[in-house]
Amino acid sequence: MSTVSDRPRGGDAGAQAGSGPITEEEIFESHEGGKLSVEITAPLDSQRALSIAYTPGVAQVSRAIAADETLAARYTWTSRLVAVVSDGSAVLGLGDIGPRASLPVMEGKAALFKSFAGLDSIPIVLDTKDPDEIVETLVRLRPSFGAVNLEDISAPRCFDIEQRVIEALDCPVMHDDQHGTAIVVLAALNGAARALGRELAPMRVVIAGAGAAGVACANILLAAGIDDVIVLDSKGIVEPGRADLNGVKADLAARTNPARRTGGIAEALDGADVFLGVSAGKVPEALIATMAPNSIVFALSNPDPEIHPEAAARHAAVVATGRSDYPNQINNVLAFPGVFRGALDVGARRITESMKIAAAEAILSVVGDELSPQKIVPSPLDPRVAPAVAEAVARAAKQDGVA
């Protein structure tokens, strides 16, 4: 099965031990030869073992699967295998760096699946940006895996590709840049509201960024009952009066901004309760100061947030970032391992909105009595998170009838 390599990795050990800054040498050394290897589930230490695992014994298993394809889920690793798929077009904050340069990130994602959810996964980077070719490739590869984690595919192509792959395959599919982010944001926003003794539904939320994460966050917040959501792109508030909107943004404009505000970030933030930054744009401290009392600021761009957390904290009651060196880190690893584990545990055919909302509720439940403005989500390293998310997602899949 796919697993994190057993080679010593000084960078990881140093970071965990807090022994000082991570050096460039440590980083490259930890990636040398890749971060993954394959190990077997039983030793091949005798002629008998070899005959069982391979020929002639394996032929019996192949004949059985040929007669009943559903047996592949029991006698191969496909039912527990996630394909981590990217075209390298929107990698981290690096942009369109291509499939080969994206592979270290996909290997890292596979390592996280194994470490946090016990799931095997295989990185697949595709040397094409053509949606038709990407979808067809995954359709042809379907017998080899049990779920698809789409990763680092640029917007707006990512929306079309994800929807088409969902429709084409009979297994869980999720673009983590969209939905992993949205799930953790919903969990964190619920945590922030409860820590402040506020209700979520009446809040006015401003989302800076109309790419993969921004659109998904808007959708999940609307589904969670927040009516007043405003989304901005590089040209200002996404609203129906604009003639330059693509199909995804036009749809979003019709479902958000009920007061039909126009303008830019200054007009959007004036009196707003929540700022959610999922773009690389900077927000002046003076604009954060115009938000409503007891405001909430999630500045999630990495490594440089839209506004420095210390500056935001001078005006906001709760501040979160994507960084690990400040409180309230919004990290996708809180969501995706448990989401896929829960979906695969019950043989779900797809990942529904209810499953995503259940995942967000499970993440927050782990915080428990420790909830405070400085702790609105658990640590990404908390071992309780993935099992809690998996259980909630599995239960929601059964309720939705997709298990």
Image (spheres, grey):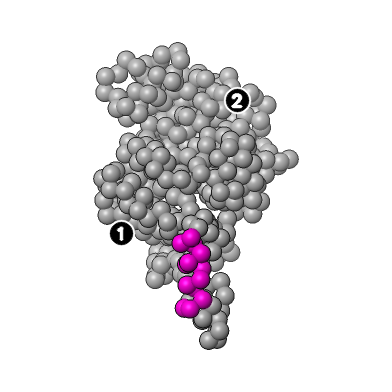
For label 2, count other residues whose C-alpha is less than 10 Å away and answer few (under 14), some (14-19) or many (20+). many
Quarter of the rendering containing residue 213 = top left
Q: What element does badge 1 sit on?
A: helix
Depth check: 83 or 335 in front? 83
Q: Residue at x 47, y 70 (%)?
A: 38
Q: Secondary structure at mark 2?
A: loop
The residue depicted at 32 percent of the width and 52 percent of the height is 137
Q: Which residues are magenta?
A: 55-67
Name the one closer to the observer, 390 or 348: 348
Q: Is any part of residue 204 visible from this angle?
A: yes
Q: Which part of the image, by quadrant, shows the C terminus?
A: top right
Marks 1 and 2, Cα distance to the nearest angstrom? 42 Å
Residue 203: give x, y in percent of width and height.
Answer: 56, 22
Residue on which disc 2 sits: 200
Q: Is residue 66 magenta?
A: yes
Residue 13 on the magenta span:
no
Q: Residue 100: which disc?
A: 1
Residue 293: image quadrant is top right
- Of callouts 1 and 2, the N-terminal one: 1
Amino acid type assigned to the residue bearing label 2 in the image = Leu
| Position in image of residue 254 (x %, y %) | 40, 19
Count the numbered circles shown: 2
Amino acid type, label 1? Arg
**How far across and down, in percent of the image, does residue 199 sit?**
63, 23
